[in-house]
Image: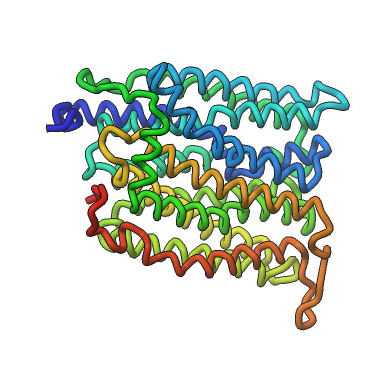
């Protein structure tokens, strides 16, 4: 009997409640940077250009790419709960520095960039702790419903919050409003530490030794884990830039007002909400194999749709919001699939390294995607506009086309996924 089984229904429910609390406290800062337009709009108010706005969105991928695996060593030395404490205080500091950026005068843009960098420093440490902490009280049969419910709460809360913020922002939001929102998001991170400290502890658990080479070797020899990691990395390269690039396109090329851009980003939260709400039912009805294929095809369709429309298209803002809704809905399904597959592929006794291994690959993909787009926007690699059959295509639309074509090419890797070929010698405990 596993420790999760021994907890009983009441113990497992209590663990899930604390996990929901930790999630709600930390989700505002994460969504604000990853999915919302607030940080991008704040950087624009400070005077940051397209390249810099895209660059701050690549920090998470850049740092996590290098820090996920070293984070395993820190966790082994300190224990996951103490590591979470360090991560939460660092994240709070970074957001508070971003909120204070306008007070740095001519250095205000760089103060915001450094604050964002400090926040992103801790994300790999927290991320490497999260799944092993959940695995203490989460059984394989509980994963689908848990991750769907968790992320449904996550985006319902942030979607409602950011929609109200978008209404309050209007055409020219004042500095104090943006600073207050960012500072509140930073302070909420401390609540994540409180709830995580209440998670159940397995008294019989043996702390994994910080033998990075051995643990990494186990993960690298796990064929299904490696195959899934490579696939997730490449798909992440294709789709991660779509959201932030859309916000920059709407604000700087189309010229929509900040409040409208933020409302579109809040509409996208609805895609997350719906996806997480129905994920467990979709998983039960179709299975993870069909969901992974559907996710991939949806990303191809969304990227090509963004290429195919422009500001002259009738009802353009509503269509853009609808496409972003599809992107976020698809992202929610991908996130749940990814969480379930990480735990399914992680060998017992090597879960921290295995989950860090997968997240290193996806972080690399996120950095290549957003960092690459940042370099493209900051260079003369693409013409500002070009003609195609009488239509004027912007450089933003060119990048959307590149993302769609890349995702289409990666379809050839679908047969390598463990969910497609689940019978093999390596470890795989799929979600039931």
Left or right: where does residue 366 sit relative to residue 52? Answer: left
Q: Is residue 63 above or below residue 431?
A: above
Spot the residue most to the left.
Answer: 1
**Which of these two is toward me, 127 or 328?**
127
Residue 172 % position (x, y):
79, 40
Q: Residue at x 76, y 83 (%)?
A: 389
> Which x, y percent locates residue 383?
83, 65
Query: Where's residue 141, x and y in %?
Result: 21, 45
Give the number of callouts.
0
Q: Residue at x 28, y 43 (%)?
A: 143
Q: Is residue 306 visible?
A: yes
Image coloring type? rainbow
Q: Quadrant of residue 16?
A: top left
Give residue 287's position: percent from left, percent from top. Answer: 28, 60
Taking the spot 80% from the left edge, 21% from the top edge, the residue there is 103
197 is higher (above) or lower (below) than 239 = above
Quarter residue 83 falls in? top left
Task: State the residue in front, 151 or 318.
Answer: 151
Question: 16 left or right of 297?
Answer: left
Q: Tell me: residue 406, above or below residue 188.
A: below
Quadrant of the rendering where the N terminus is positioned: top left
Q: Is residue 40 above or below residue 306?
A: above
In the shown orientation, is residue 89 left or right of residue 11? right
Is residue 271 visible from the viewing direction of this image?
no
Find the residue positioned furthest to the right.
106
Left or right position of 31 against 232: right
Foreground: 377 or 272? Answer: 377
Image point (72%, 32%), residue name: 113
């Amino acid at each position: 009997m596993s420790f999760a089984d021994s907890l009983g229904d009441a113990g497992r429910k209590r663990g899930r409640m604390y996990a929901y609390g930790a999630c709600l406290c930390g989700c505002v800062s994460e969504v604000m940077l990853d999915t919302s337009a607030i940080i991008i709009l704040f950087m624009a108010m400070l005077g940051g250009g397209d390249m810099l706005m895209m660059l701050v969105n690549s920090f998470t991928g850049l740092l996590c790419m290098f820090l996920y695996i070293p984070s395993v060593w820190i966790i082994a030395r300190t224990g996951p709960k103490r590591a979470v404490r360090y991560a939460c205080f660092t994240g709070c500091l970074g957001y508070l520095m971003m909120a204070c950026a306008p007070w740095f005068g001519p250095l205000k843009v760089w103060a915001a960039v450094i604050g964002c960098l400090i926040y992103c420093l801790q994300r790999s440490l927290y991320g490497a702790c999260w799944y092993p902490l959940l695995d203490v009280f989460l059984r394989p049969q509980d994963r689908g419903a848990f991750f769907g419910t968790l992320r449904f709460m996550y985006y319902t809360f942030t979607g409602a919050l950011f929609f109200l913020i978008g209404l309050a922002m209007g055409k020219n939001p004042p500095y104090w409003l943006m600073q207050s929102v960012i500072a509140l998001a930073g302070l909420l991170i401390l609540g994540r530490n409180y709830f995580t400290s209440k998670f159940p502890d397995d008294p019989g658990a043996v702390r994994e030794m910080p033998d990075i080479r051995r643990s990494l070797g186990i993960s690298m020899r796990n064929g299904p884990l490696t195959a899934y990691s490579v696939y997730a990395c490449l798909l992440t390269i294709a789709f991660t830039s779509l959201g932030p690039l859309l916000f920059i396109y709407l604000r700087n090329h189309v010229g929509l007002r900040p409040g409208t851009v933020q409302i579109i980003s809040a509409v996208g939260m609805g895609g997350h909400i719906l996806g997480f709400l129905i994920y467990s039912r979709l998983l039960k009805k179709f299975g993870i194999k069909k969901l992974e294929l559907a996710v991939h095809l949806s990303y191809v369709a969304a990227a090509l749709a963004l290429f195919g429309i422009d500001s002259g298209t009738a009802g353009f803002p509503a269509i853009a919001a609808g496409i972003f809704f599809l992107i976020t809905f698809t992202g929610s399904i991908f996130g749940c699939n990814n969480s379930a597959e990480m735990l399914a592929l992680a060998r017992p006794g090597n879960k921290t390294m295995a989950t860090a291994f997968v997240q290193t690959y996806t972080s690399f993909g996120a950095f290549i995607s957003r960092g690459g787009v940042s370099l493209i926007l900051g260079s003369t690699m693409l013409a500002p506009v070009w003609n195609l059959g009488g239509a004027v295509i912007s450089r933003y639309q060119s990048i959307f086309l590149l993302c769609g074509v890349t995702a289409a090419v990666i379809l050839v890797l679908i047969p390598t996924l463990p969910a497609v070929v689940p019978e093999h010698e390596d470890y795989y405990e799929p979600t039931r």
